[in-house]
Image (tube, rainbow, N blue to C red):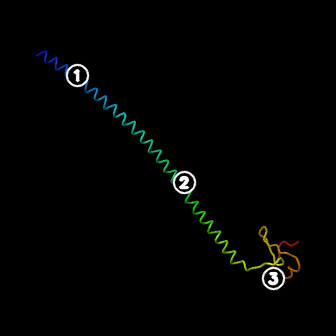
Amino acid sequence: MRICKAIRALQAGEAMVQVTGAIDGVAALMAEIASASAEQATGIEQVNRAVSQMDEVTQQNAALVEQAAAAGSLVDQAKALKAHVSFFRISNENIAFACWGYFFCARESGIEKMLNKNKIECIGQD
């Protein structure tokens, strides 16, 4: 019986060594899983930053498209305005121009009399 007990003790010891080895193997696998998870988290963070940057650039492009459309609309409006006022003709004798918020009237060839007749006051005359 003592020999049987000794054999069983040796078998139990070998089983304990195998269990300890298996536990070490599981611990190593868990460490690898943790490392892979950390790498995945880093990769996902990088992808998230890239998507955010792409979204920002897309929004900037959309704003540029809106500005370009508005500029095109302004060009069309300017052309239409030019077409509407193209029938007006101004002679050199009827020129009045604005400068620094004041209207200065031309004083050539009797314009001053015409302006006074139409009750237009010339400002800034010498």
Earlier in the chain: of badge 2 and badge 1, it is 1
How far apart are the two marked residues, 2 and 1, measured between alpha carbons? Answer: 64 Å
Instruction: For the N terminus, give its image quadrant.
Output: top left
Label placed on residue 82: none
Quadrant hosting residue 41: top left
Say what amino acid the circle numbered 1 marks: Glu
* Helix, strand or loop under label 3: loop
Name which residue lies at 41% across and 41% down.
40
Earlier in the chain: of badge 3 and badge 2, it is 2
* Helix, strand or loop under label 2: helix
Are the residues at dot 3 and dot 2 in contact (C-beta closer than 8 Å)?
A: no
The percent position of residue 126, horizontal first and vertical second, equals: 88, 71
Q: Give the vertical position of 86 relative to 12 (above or below).
A: below
Name the residue furthest left.
Answer: 1
How far apart are the two marked residues, 1 and 3, measured between alpha carbons? Answer: 121 Å
Name which residue lies at 47% across and 44% down.
46
The percent position of residue 10, horizontal first and vertical second, equals: 20, 19
Say what amino acid the circle numbered 3 marks: Lys
Say what amino acid the circle numbered 2 marks: Val
The percent position of residue 76, horizontal first and vertical second, equals: 64, 71
Residue highlighted by disc 1: 14
Quadrant hosting residue 99: bottom right
Q: Is residue 49 left or right of residue 68?
A: left
Residue highlighted by disc 3: 119
Label placed on residue 57: 2
Quadrant hosting residue 82: bottom right
